[in-house]
Image (cartoon, coloured by chain):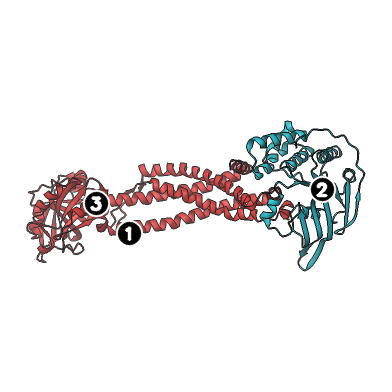
Amino acid sequence: MEVARIENVSRVYKTGAVETYALREVNLSIQGGEFTALVGPSGSGKTTLLQLIGCLDQPTSGRVFINGKDVSALNRDQRADMRRGTIGFIFQFFALIPTLTAYENVEMPLLLVGQNAASRRARVMQLLDVVGLADRAHHRPDQMSGGQQQRVAIARALAPNPSLILADEPTANLDTPNGKQVMEIMARLNQETGVTFVFATHDPRVIQYARRVVTLRDGRIVETHEAQLQPFQVEPAIAGA
Amino acid sequence: MFQLFRVAWRDLGRNRRRSFFSALALGMGLAVLLLMAAVIKGEMRDSMNAAIRLNSGHLQVRAATYNEDKTSLAWEDLIENPARIAAQIAQLEPVAAATPRLFASGVVVIGGESVGVRLVGIVPDSEANAPYRDGLVSGAFVTADDRAGILIGQTLADKFGLKAGDTVNLLVNTSNGDVDEQTFVIRGIYSTGTPGLDQTTVLMPLDKAQTITQAGNHASAIFVLLKDREQTNAVASALQGSQYRVVTFEQMNEILVQTDALAGGYMIIIYLIVLAITATVIVNTLIMAVFERTREIGILSAIGMRSSRIMAMFFAESSLLAIGGIMIGLILGSLLTLYASTVGFYIGDFGITGIPLGERIYAWLTPGDALTLTALAFIVTLLASLYPARLAARMEPVQALRGGE
């Protein structure tokens, strides 16, 4: 099943009279269960493409479909509604709310979709367990390492059972062991739950986890290929997630 | 909802000092307003009470043609056989006291100096004279059969160095338009705590006043005090007849009523000015919070939080600031008002025509004023947060995630 489709999408930023093309007539289809890397040098349009797929931004021209629905012309709140429960985000800067504990950060999207307290509690603890942070549930972000924070962000992205998780340079601020751990968790969740992951990166160590690599340069997709999956141990820890 | 306020509470806790001082600003503003409202209300209440006790009563029954401004003494403008009418009125259950009074214009002459006064003929035994009897500072109260004695106020006595036993010449208008002059003995000196009134009011027994003014068996009005002020209109309606005119304390103290209404209007403007100033502190605090938390707003938006909920977060913060500020304000305001209502402010002899002012102003905070100001402070604070909340809610998630760049 097609989770996202990008049709002839261009994104132009205007600064005074100067127009800068971040994306030029890009076409891309993302199927359910993909674990896809968007790669390319800085300024190639990876993040912009991710933002358009994630309904955070709107294309200057072309159309974006999420689960078959055209989201290109939705207003701010309609896009928020689309993101809520459908799309999860993992950012380069761990992007947790600093005043909330790990538990509360993961709980936040569940509050927004209106889950009741009992099912929220069960879901949050299950996800924190999956990312290995059940014992850090009541720690605040400043009491956790960068790797731990990013794992909380993964749990939060996964909380409302989205069909698509978008990660923008998820390991850029992590050391190698933490980066590896984060990628392995993401890959494992992809395999076990079938949730689609699309991540932007230019880190070769991250790219090796992708099953499909889409290369961008100067706002265009210049290459798409199925990549070799790096073998890793999958621990069945998210049954029912 | 609970989560919203929990998050708001923690967000305020990020910068406790800033949050505290914002709440304090609101609290101080509210405290000042509570004090101001209480002082104005207390002053108006005391002035009206003084006017009723000393000057107008709750009601006066007058001849239909009586003209108060001219202090008319023509018989047709006066009430004939007033003692009988007063006795009838006194029979009514809500009436505490009813007594005839005769008003006349006069001039007190002491040595080479003179001063205009209002001569009031009273029935000395009446309960209605209690403020003068209780306020006697020297000498004795006049008796009904005293043909040469008067009572003067302390302010007038101090002004001319008079004491009980001294004599003064009194020139009085008469009913036929002439002026009569007689020498009187100051039997006693009273103090009502209202210097303006004490300087201008000279009391004498009604019989003597009727004689000197040639008013016969007439009085200007029946002065009526009620047990409960709220009964005024009901009693006025009951007494209303074609022969007489019944006027209420509100009609007789129109300047005071108008001043009260005017003060109320000005106070609302002052409330809004003071609260607007404190609101700018709240606006500033919340705008800083929005800019500091731009990226977090982006995150919340990214995970699907709608604009309205982002606004609600900031409304929750301002509500908590308002509640904190209001608590501070109520505590400070209560302390200030308690002091002002027990000790009062000394203003001395600060006379305003038509408004009997005491030497001290005592505050009186009504539950209505406290509730109105509290609600106003809360509403103004919420309105103040509208702009920062909209600022946060209108952020595009992409820009917000970049920290607003």
Which chain has been coloured cyan in this picture? A
| Secondary structure of residue under mark 3 | helix
**Which residue position holds label 1?**
B258
Do badges 2 and 1 share one subunit? Answer: no
For the residues labelled 1 and 3, the Cα–Cα distance comes to 19 Å
Extreme residue in the bottom direction? A17
Q: Amino acid at mark 1?
A: Gln
N-terminal label among 1 and 3: 3
Q: Amino acid at mark 3?
A: Thr
Task: State which mark lies toward you, 2 or 3.
Answer: 2
Chain designation of label 2: A
Which chain has been coloured red in this picture? B
Task: State which mark lies toward you, 2 or 1.
Answer: 2
Q: Is residue B184 left or right of residue B229?
A: left
Height in image: B74 above or below B343?
Answer: below
- Circle 2 crowding by C-alpha within 10 Å: few under 14, some 14–19, many from 20: many
| Secondary structure of residue under mark 2 | strand
